[in-house]
Image: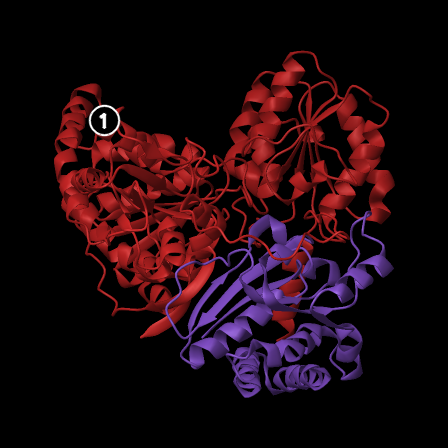
Chain colours: A purple, B red
Amino acid sequence: MKKDIILCGVGGQGILSIATIIGEAATKAGLYLKQAEVHGMSQRGGDVQSNLRLSTEPIWSDLIAEAGADLIISMEPMESMRYLAYLSKDGKIVTSSKPFINIPNYPDEAALQQELDTLPSVKLDIDTVAKDCGNPRGANMVLLGMAAPYIGILSVEDLREAIATVFARKGEQVVEANLKAFDAGVKTS
Amino acid sequence: MKKLLLGDEAIALGAINAGLSGVYAYPGTPSTEITEYIQNNPLAKERGVHSRWCTNEKTAMEAALGMSYAGKRALVCMKHVGMNVCADAFVNSAITGVKGGLIVLAADDPSMHSSQNEQDSRFYAKFALVPCLEPSNQQEAYDMMAYGFDLSEKLGEPIVLRVVTRLAHSRAAVEVTEPKVEKSLSPATDQWVLLPGIARKKYVKLLEKQEAMKQASATSPYNCAFRFTRKDQSPTTGILACGIAYNYVREALAGDANLVKISQYPLPEEKIKALAAECDELLVIEDGQPVVEELVKGLLGAGYPVKGRLTGDLPRTGELTPDCVAKALGKETGAVFAPAKNMAARPPQLCQGCGHRDVYAALNQVLADYPDHRVFGDIGCYTLGALPPFQSLSSCVDMGASITMAKGAADAGLFPAVAIIGDSTFTHSGMTGLLDAVNDKANITVIISDNLTTGMTGGQDSAGTNKYEAICLGLGVEPEHVRVVVPLPKNMPEITQVIREEINYHGVSVIIPRRECIQTFARHARAKKQ
């Protein structure tokens, strides 16, 4: 069994934290893992993505091939469609519905949402959900919760444990706040 | 024990556990995380392994060679273009030879994710006549550190370890070994003075070592031949897969290939000849430039068909992908979904609140009055000033080129010639150019946009922090033309006034807008709170 995931968004939205948590959970579960990240200049407010490959068998390539991704998890709706070439026939997009507009030529929002609806996608205003559960900086954890049932190769409980491990050094409060955001995300999907 | 590590971290931990005594480096994507990992590693701290950032790649290379001279194991790390900066020291280190193991880590960036070119560091290894290791995965990257130090000491030569972005910045589980002890102090006793008379003898020695290097490649555990009969294909194509190309081949073909995996150079010639003899043609798959493709053409002669990037079977530019490799192997799959219609490019940009923004805003305001102006840029976050909304820059070439290019243009009569350079880039390669400008009384205005850090690579210490005025004065810039301002929107009248005055001064002036990078500022604030 394998799961190929593209994580994407805009630099600074916290996609690497999501990758770290899935990575921690996969390692604990004894899965093979490869995770290609983008560092450097592209992190400055530009589009960013990470290829995450999880499998019960050894993995060769660090990158996912076209039509190979089972899941695209995105912090931003337009960004979720940037990697459509990589989405597999039965693949799924899980994305934030709220545009992050830091460019002058951002596409028409209604048309964009409409196009997203024609694709195998689920979307949610994760910022509002995060705010509602008292953790406005936890939108990425809401998204991870939303995506959790689709990840499949890891259980929701595996991911909860990984959140606790990854945020442990930041203290009990931070762990609780992130778990709350994650659970809120799980509930929506 | 298994650990989840970035390729860069695997290199760092591999080096520490191989008994490293010092890492010398200047930050550069995708190599930066190696040194950062060593700086934060408990064992390296306990042992006092040197890990402070160097001013540039040349000072790093020379210091590493000095540590090797003293008998200890040293690692020097840089991005590919850093090899150009340290080339003098690097090429000559092959002539002097080494005492303690010396690994020169070059992180190449095919596709230029964060670089100015796609140069392939394997050329440098061949140029200097030293071995090169090219790991195919994180485990090999780890293992090759101990292997490389041993090989370096056995041959008495530096070893190039070449990685590419996709390995440097990809994580996988790595089986970690027990740390070895450091080498003790035992300085070289042979002559390292490269006077012509001595250098000639040493060069002959280096040439004599080539046979041992070839032998090491021939028997290397990292160069392996895989033979599987491919009945489905005619004519049969033999594959040479270099470094991470091997993974893409295995992804596409599973076990079904006649293949030689190449992860150690000089090339394992006999293995390649044996593969060629069994097949009708060879396909060379390598990330970066067609180094092996050209060499193999020479090795097999004009009559033998060799395919690769030069023949168009693989793209001539850009990094390898599982898709382009699968296509070259006749296994292309292709996208299911059409590209999105509602899509726009999202280029990187300067952070909101960044001091560089205020510098460009002020500069653009003043320069609007000088239609013939040119602004010569440099390497760093502030290169993004070339893009909208500022579009201030006319050039960005290499570390330090802003000052010297402005000077050359001013020599030709261009006015106003403005250079903009970051604090870390200035100490890396800008100071010598400023001395040239002062000695020539060049009519240039230099802006050292000082954010107190090496920003683009993630906020590493900058070598000249708190020393910039003193450096400029020491190089001979007149005291009344070294001006410091604080780049904030509220200071715009003062900053524009200063820029205008210094442009109108006929000679070298330096303006230092100084405000901490907002990323490191936020990080420092968080650290204080915790």
Q: Position of residue A39 (x, y in %)?
A: 55, 54
Image mark 1: chain: B
Question: Compared to B193, does B257 lie above or below?
Answer: below
Question: Compared to B465, does A54 lie above or below?
Answer: below
In front: A48, or B54? A48
In front: B143, or A106? A106
- Identify the residue at horizontal 30%, vertical 38% (top origin): B282
- Identify the residue at horizontal 41%, vertical 31% (top origin): B311
Amino acid identity at mark 1: Leu
In front: A118, or B111? A118
Q: In the shown orientation, is residue B23 left or right of residue A188?
A: left
> Which of the 4 image quarters holds residue B47?
bottom left
- Identify the residue at horizontal 81%, vertical 28% (top origin): B367
Residue B449 seen: no
The residue that disc 1 covers is B194
Q: Position of residue B165 (x, y in %)?
A: 47, 50
Q: Quadrant of the C terminus of chain B?
A: bottom right
Residue B85 seen: yes
